[in-house]
Image (cartoon, rainbow, N blue to C red):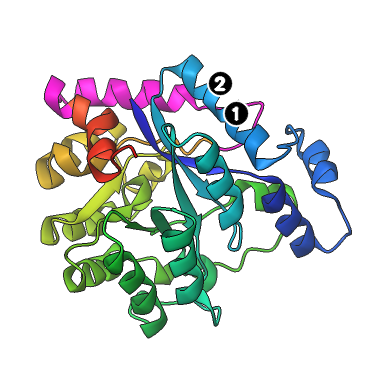
Amino acid sequence: MNDTHCHFFSTQFFTTLAKHRGKGDTPSQLCRELEWDDPGTPEELAARWVRELDAAGVSRAALIASVPGDEASVAAAVASHKNRFVGFFMLDPSTADAAERAWRAVANLGLRGICLFPAMHHVPLDDERVRRVVEVAEAHPGTAVFVHCGVLSVGVRKKLGLVSRFDMRLGDPLGVARLAAMFPSVPFIIPHFGAGLFREALMAADFCPNVHLDTSSSNGWVRYIPGLTLDEVFRTALAVAGPSRLLFGTDSSFFPRGWQKPVHEAQAAALAAANATLDARTRIMGGNFARLFPAA
């Protein structure tokens, strides 16, 4: 089993949130307020993730640097456990050095997933700045572009009282389809089955064979679509995208909660209810991740 979606809440992550709040908090103070464990150094947090994944029976995982500018933390984690982790990083395309930063992260630091959050950073997917970032992925085969679509709610920001002026109109899977058609050699990943824009995510995957759907989180967005269940989400996604383009993920993030076993259990049950074959379950739960991100 491999997990495509785990957040790496490093010390730098908390430093950035503290700056946004502007109260002079230290990362340790934020962790105490949240009742979360202090992450320590990137290497210490990586070692804790290894122990957590070992206990859960997870072979490899993608770790996401979850604020722009934190590429180095995930790169250090990957460097210390190259056989266990694939590094993803959040990128803000509105910054003047976005394409250059993406190039350094991929070419120099060895990261393999560029994560875009259009609603958060207010950059439409048809913007020239986004195209330049995707060109970096195209120039480095084996690099994926992860695009958060649909509803966006960042729990830690809510807990800390941070204002989140997200524009969810910008996170449209059909915009991902346009990019995927322009860059057919680049794998695109839409997390959470489109996070409420399920129909549009299915359309994108149906139109573009390089669009993948990640299954992560509790997928609470199903409540926006009357009568929809997680079982039916998997059944329909299998029918449209097929078993080779669904990537299991949990959306795990902080400690002491750690790896989200209940998410795995719910998705495994949904796959069984959807009558997924053993081959399909094997691909979704790890095989597709291994194909997109072969071990070094």
Q: Is residue 121 left or right of residue 273?
A: right
Could you say whether the residue bearing mark 1 is in a helix, strand or loop? helix
Image coords of residue 118 (percent x, y): 45, 68
* Residue located at (31% from left, 73% from top): 135
Q: Name the residue under label 2.
A: 51
Task: Give the residues drawn in magenta, as a range.
Answer: 253-280
Give the answer, above or below, for where 264 lies relative to 74: above
Q: Residue at x 32, y 37 (%)?
A: 295
> Callout 2: helix, strand or loop?
helix
Horizontal side of 167 relative to 58 (left or right) equals right
Q: Do the residues labelled 1 and 2 touch (CB within 8 Å)?
A: yes
Mark 2: few/some/many CA within 10 Å (<14, 14-19, 20+) = few
Apparent side of residue 116 relative to residue 288 in the rendered image (left or right): right
Residue 227 x %, y %? 28, 38
Query: Mark 1 highlights which residue?
Result: 47
The spot of residue 88 in percent (x, y) is: 45, 51
Image position of 48 with respect to 289: above or below: above
Q: Where is residue 286 in the image (x, y as percent from the top left)?
A: 28, 30
Q: Quadrant of residue 296?
A: top left
Type of amino acid under label 1: Ala
For the point 41% across and 32% down, which residue is it?
A: 83
- Calculate the distance from the C-alpha at mark 1 to the C-alpha at mark 2: 6 Å
Q: Does the magenta stretch include residue 205?
A: no
